[in-house]
Image (cartoon, rainbow, N blue to C red):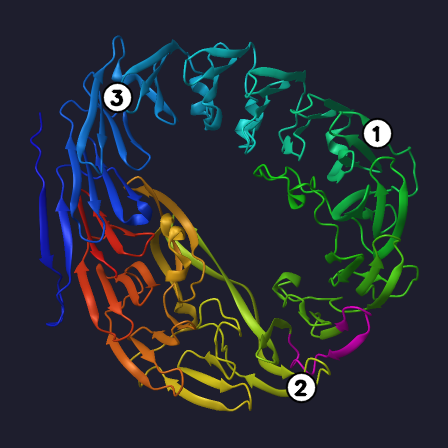
Amino acid sequence: MRIFLLSLLLFPVSLFSQQQSSLVWKHELPENIKTIHPIENGRYLFVWSDEYAWLYESATGKKIWNVAIREYSDKAVHQLLDDSLYLVSDDDTLKCFSLFQNRLLWKKKYQNIAQEEFEALKKFDTLVVLSFGETDLCISLLTGAEIWRARMNYEKALVEAGTQNAIVVGRRNKYAAFLDDGSCTLVDGETGKRLLHLPKFEPNSDLIKQQRTWFYLPPNEKYIALVGEKEIAVIDVKEDSLITRRPLSVDERYNVIIPTNSGCGFFGEEKFIHVNPVTGAVAEAAVDINGIRNYASIQTDSGEVLLLSLENKIIGINLDNGKILWQSPPKNPLLNGFLHRFVTESSNNIVVTYVDPSDDVKLYLMSINAFTGKINYRTLVAHADESLPKRNLPLPPVLLTNNSESRLFGFENIGFEYFCSAIDSVVSFLIYTEADMIEPGTKNDGGEGIVLLDSKTGKVIAKNYMKIAHGLSFAGGLTALAKPMHLDSIVVVAGNKNVVALHSKTGRLLWMLIEDDLNGSYALEFALVGKRFLIRTGGRKISYTYDQKKEKLQMKKAWEEDDYTLLAVEPASGKVLWKKTFDFDPWTIFPEYSVVRYSIGDSLLLYGSEKFLSALSLNSNIQRWIFEFSDSGVGTLAYDDMYKPSSYWSGEYLMHKDSLHYYADSNTTLLTKELAGEKYHWGVSRVLQVNYSPSTNSLIAIGDDGIAAINSTNGRRLWHYEWDYNDDAIQYRPMFIKDKLFYCIKQKATLLHLATGKLVWQTVLDKETGIFLMPDCSSVIFVYKDEIFGAPIQ
């Protein structure tokens, strides 16, 4: 038996100024820490280390609770429940502790139960079902009393393959168990009674290998949809009955299950099956999975109707009664293609975009009567002098959502992009692409532009075709250009070294900026600051890879457009009010740069280089102030040194967004490991930077020599902090948290106060120390082997 030792050390942190009275706390534990778990958003911290477990207050290190298990086994039960109870085995006894009551609630022994055979736990309100070997044991969490036990031989190979061998239906207090005899059993979690048994039903192994979903439990938990090896089954978990079980062979290259408003569907190799669990109706349609292109549904007065779009064919299915309403006749000249996007609906009519790739690639707006299949209209909107791109297979695994963006079966890309929206009875198309476009109904080049149509009749209200992005050779591609911006009735579009403004209701060309106006560059951002419309050109994108064998980080420019210009434009006329050209990259020193983000009020815009920061007057194009980095003790902000390797905890995303007043670039994760039971990443993060908080009007520069706060009105230095920077020794990149700045470089974890630049605390860490910023931004926790220590942020 080990002797339980615990010491709490409260000590002044190194390098404090004389005025500082903050302390960090530290616990040296008897074993290396296995797991930490924040509770109440990080206010408390649960710590587990084999036979020991503790609960601390994160900010102060105050111990709330602890336990030492005499006869502990890592194979036995050790589970944290509801962030308040700790269930753990002590030899042949199961114990339940209340963390916040700091007491043992109960302890029980269970006859013929080997605690070391523990495999899984399922919770149903105040009941817990524990799986031990071939036995499921249900106990009361309140008293530990045994409620029931049942023999249950789970199929362990499912867990080994990376999936699960039980589906918990918490709202019904039931679970579906998959057993080693190849069967599925629905079990009552309160009584242990077997409610339904499906012999010879095994989850589909091909889908599991491809990490695709093989079951679906809807939010109301009324049924479970299952995909087996050669069949599907749908179980009514409310009524404990089998709704249907039907043969179905699937293709693992596709996602099989699709939820609908009425139930769920299954795509098989040779047929589609839909099950309505409310009515019990089952629809089957003979289809080749390779011919399926898309599907869309419409809620009509008589129920939900699904349109199944195949190559050159559409099938209408009533999902309420399972009847196939209609199938389009073969060789229908109006259906030489497939449904691409859902647009809107009206009564029993569904309006969609339809792609016909039989002769070039043509895009139509089409209205179909969902009950009869009658095509009300089909209006040509766009014509690309291109071939349909190759199908994208296998499909990526997707989450189960009834989302139109995930419905396409490898035909998302039709060779050109378009934006489509419906407001009232008007459908608006905005087409701009580098593809070769033809004006519909003619042989003229220039099929980009705007088209407005009546959604009820399909008639063109207005149209204006032209060339916008045709011939684009920019390495960043269309996605790097500024997104279209609506300014009242004006829509502004970025193209191939041009900018086009169109009237959103008439399609009329209002104005155009050409290559000379943009200094031979591409518009990468549109912004409206106050009443000023600004256009920004120039930028770069960097990608990183890591060679594990050479242990070397490699940086590569994915693209760079080095003609940097800022223009102020009159939105109504397109008149260029002023233009500023830069002979350096003025945007890279800022995280997530955009004109709106780095505007100070409506009058100033921040920009800078490797050597200085400046503010530009948006009224007069005059430089208001300049801040020299070197002269001010900041050093330099070399473009190639902005991003450096750093580690970080995956739980950062839980931090309150309102606590992060400053902007941050996304981290590029290259490696992931587990530290203290949590996912811990190593990758590339922004380090050197100039950052601005609009909410606090605070401006911070971080260079290779020091950190400085700058008055955003006049550019004067408010304070300076000299830091010991080494870009090869970054453990945690600078992180803005409320009114503090945290970082760890050269093993020194440091917290600065942004208002004063004064050191709040600093402590020296080991290189292998894990750093965890608590989600509530109240504290930072450090874990190293058998030591855990922390300090408050607030």
Task: Check disc 2 and report the residue beneath it.
Answer: 576
Task: Check disc 3 and report the residue beneath it.
Answer: 143
Query: Measured along the vertical axis of the image, is residue 430 above or below residue 362?
Result: below
Q: What stretch is highlighted in magenta?
A: 502-521
**Disc sitting over residue 242 in the figure:** none
Task: Check disc 1 and report the residue beneath it.
Answer: 325
Residue 386, x across and y down, in percent: 81, 54
Mark whose residue sits in front, 1 or 3: 3
Q: Is the magenta stretch mostly helix, strand or loop?
A: loop
Question: What secondary structure is found at the residue carrying circle 2?
Answer: strand
Tell me what residue is drawn at x 63 percent, y 67 percent.
481
Tell me what residue is drawn at x 42 percent, y 18 percent.
189
Mark whose residue sits in front, 2 or 3: 3
Tell me what residue is drawn at x 88 percent, y 49 percent.
359
Quadrant in the picture for residue 732: bottom left
Instruction: Estimate how packed mark 2 is, as few (under 14), some (14 to 19) or many (20 or more) residues with alpha carbons within 10 Å.
Output: some
Question: What secondary structure is found at the residue carrying circle 3?
Answer: loop
Residue toward you, 554 or 427: 427
Residue type at the position of mark 1: Leu
Note whether residue 182 is visible.
no
Q: Which of marks 2 and 1 is nearer the N terminus?
A: 1
Q: Earlier in the sequence, mark 1 or mark 3?
A: 3
Residue type at the position of mark 2: Val
Alpha carbon of mark 1 to alpha carbon of mark 3: how far?
A: 57 Å
Tell me what residue is drawn at x 12 percent, y 65 percent.
21
Question: What secondary structure is found at the residue carrying circle 1?
Answer: strand
Note whether residue 395 is visible.
yes
Pointer 1 with pointer 3, Cβ within 8 A: no
Residue 40, x across and y down, in percent: 31, 46
Q: Would you say residue 508 sits in the magenta stretch?
A: yes
